[in-house]
Amino acid sequence: MTEERIKRSARNVFSRKGFAGARISEIANSAGVKNAMVHYYFRSKQSLFDTIMKETVMKLRSIINPFINDEQTSLEEKIDLTIEKIHIFLLDNQDLPMFILNELQTNTNPENFISLYFNPMEDNISNSIFFKQMETHIKEQKLDNVISANHVFINLFAMSVFPHLSSKLLMNLLELDEQEYHLLIMEGQKLESLWIKKILNLE
């Protein structure tokens, strides 16, 4: 479909050049359509950007939310699944971490960017059963004077996102090609889960 072709092209251009540097003409040329067709479907560059960002965030939430709010899934399983799903999502959206970082640095109103696309909702991670399970476990283990669920999640998030954010640098330092690096990331999931569980005295 023409609309999907335009969105694929826009994702690529926005990822490489950011919102400010992207041009409708480049998006249209890449999609094999005229500028007017882009405006027909999306009215403006801002509208197209909004569509891409909201679809991406909703896709991630649709992957994560079902199990982080499942009462039948244990804390250990949630840790494994969260790390696994974040890695899989970012392998399919490799430019996303750097793109978001660049937008936050170059956007004249980064608070508005965060509010618009990552606005706290009832299904946010901090309101999830996953967080409640962590908080309960931390209290039961008498770890609450040392760590919090926020600390644990920041570490989990950093270990999952940083390898994708710094992939080109790390591939160069480790002398790995893209396939070897992706394999290393997938193998590292078990270690990340192990480290998070050790922090929580789950192992």
Image (tube, rainbow, N blue to C red):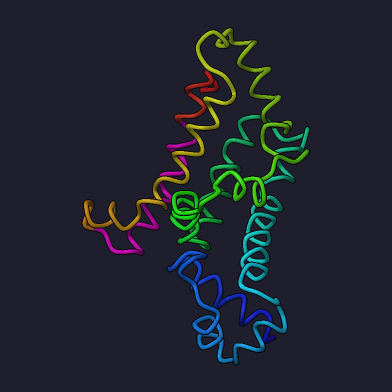
Instruction: Find residue 19 and report its horizontal and vertical position in percent.
Output: 52, 65
Instruction: Find residue 7 and report its horizontal and vertical position in percent.
Output: 62, 75
Which image quarter is the N terminus in?
bottom right
Q: Nearer the viewer, residue 3 or 62?
A: 3
> In this figure, what is the number of numbered marks?
0
The kind of secondary structure the magenta stretch mainly shows is helix
55 in relation to 31, above or below: above
130 in relation to 115, above or below: above
Image point 44% across, 49% down: which residue?
105
The verdict on residue 185 being magenta is yes
122 in relation to 114, above or below: above
Instruction: Find residue 97 and report its horizontal and vertical position in percent.
Output: 47, 53
148 in relation to 51, above or below: above
Residue 78 shown left or right of residue 99 in the figure: right
Residue 173 shown left or right of residue 134 in the figure: left
The verdict on residue 191 being magenta is yes
Image point 51% across, 77% down: which residue?
23
Image point 49% across, 82% down: which residue?
26
The segment highlighted magenta reads: 176-194
